[in-house]
Amino acid sequence: MTPELRHRIETALGTRVRRSLPLRGGNIAQATRIETDDGRNLVVKHMVPRPQSPHPIFGTLPKATLKDEAFMLDRLRQTGAVPVPEVVHVTPDLLILTFIDCDQDALSNTGQAALADVLTALHAHTAPRFGFDRPTPIGPVQRPNAWSTDWVAFLRDQRLMFFGHLAQQAGRLPDGCFAGLEKLCANLDRWIPTDQTPSLIHGDLWIGNILFRQQRLAALIDPATYYADAEIELAFLPLFSGVGSAFFERYHAHRPINPLFFEERQMLYQLEPLLAHAIFFGGGYGARVHQIVRYYGG
């Protein structure tokens, strides 16, 4: 922690930082745990200049700020359904949150059931349209969220084609994949019904954003919130969080899951996070996108 950052934190909090410890993770900001002279345990997230991306597309996109994260955390808190850290202080490049003590990285069956309880309560919060009050970031990318009453059009234009264009421009997709994605997007209504309900979702539930304490859900962090078909959150979860039958059985007991989700839509809804990971990390994510596109005839 630099002296300048320490001074900003102490000025914002009105107390001295007694101890600091770097935390892992963070795509757009560095995270540090601090203890203060007045006895508080907090997390500081601070945006720092990053080396220029090798792909100029990132320089043309709206920049995410930590005010976006604070806004989304407050929106989740307002539901009363989701435990989240409290926002103590925020500016565009500095966010101070309450520290959430947690003790496990993997999801036990009990933990999966606790997560299902929370998500069914969150997904019960609905809106008349799909989208959100503002763009919401996932990693360094601001996703558009223009309100729409048409879920198929929203998914096509503001998720799949949005990320598809970025992945293609960044050279992350195999030959023929983008043309197949365009074909698939022209036929989304073959698999996605038109009567889906706009539900509030967390939007980025990988294992690092799900905190447990003694097999109880302590908090969800780093949201990428918007109103969507809740099935897109259910599709994301098995990719990067390790949930399995214990989660889906408990979720289904609260909020029945249409069998066609597993039979027809789960892989389709995994395209958005896989496209995003292809852009950010490369590797085999582009090839997996191509496999799914071809599976659906694209």
Image: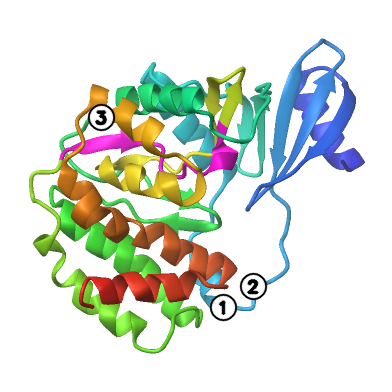
CA gap between label 1 and label 3 equals 44 Å
Total numbered circles: 3
Amino acid type assigned to the residue bearing label 2 in the image: Ser
Mark 2 packing: few (<14 Cα in 10 Å), some, or many (20+)?
few
Q: Is residue 31 left or right of residue 126?
A: right
Q: Outermost residue, bottom direction?
A: 175
Image coordinates of residue 61 in percent, x first then y, are: 48, 65
Q: Residue at x 68, y 23 (%)?
A: 99
The residue range painted magenta reads 197-210
The residue that mark 3 highlights is: 252
Tag 1 near tag 3, CB within 8 Å? no
Image coordinates of residue 143 in percent, x first then y, are: 40, 56
Amino acid type assigned to the residue bearing label 1 in the image: Pro
Q: Is residue 166 left or right of residue 27?
A: left
Mark 3 packing: few (<14 Cα in 10 Å), some, or many (20+)?
few
Placement of the N terminus among the 4 image quadrants: top right
The residue that mark 1 highlights is: 56
CA gap between label 2 and label 1 equals 7 Å
Tag 2 near tag 1, CB within 8 Å? yes
Q: Is residue 203 magenta?
A: yes
* Above or below, comparing residue 134 to residue 79 in the picture: below
Amino acid type assigned to the residue bearing label 3 in the image: His
The residue that mark 2 highlights is: 53
Q: Residue at x 56, y 78 (%)?
A: 56
| Mark number displayed over residue 284 | none
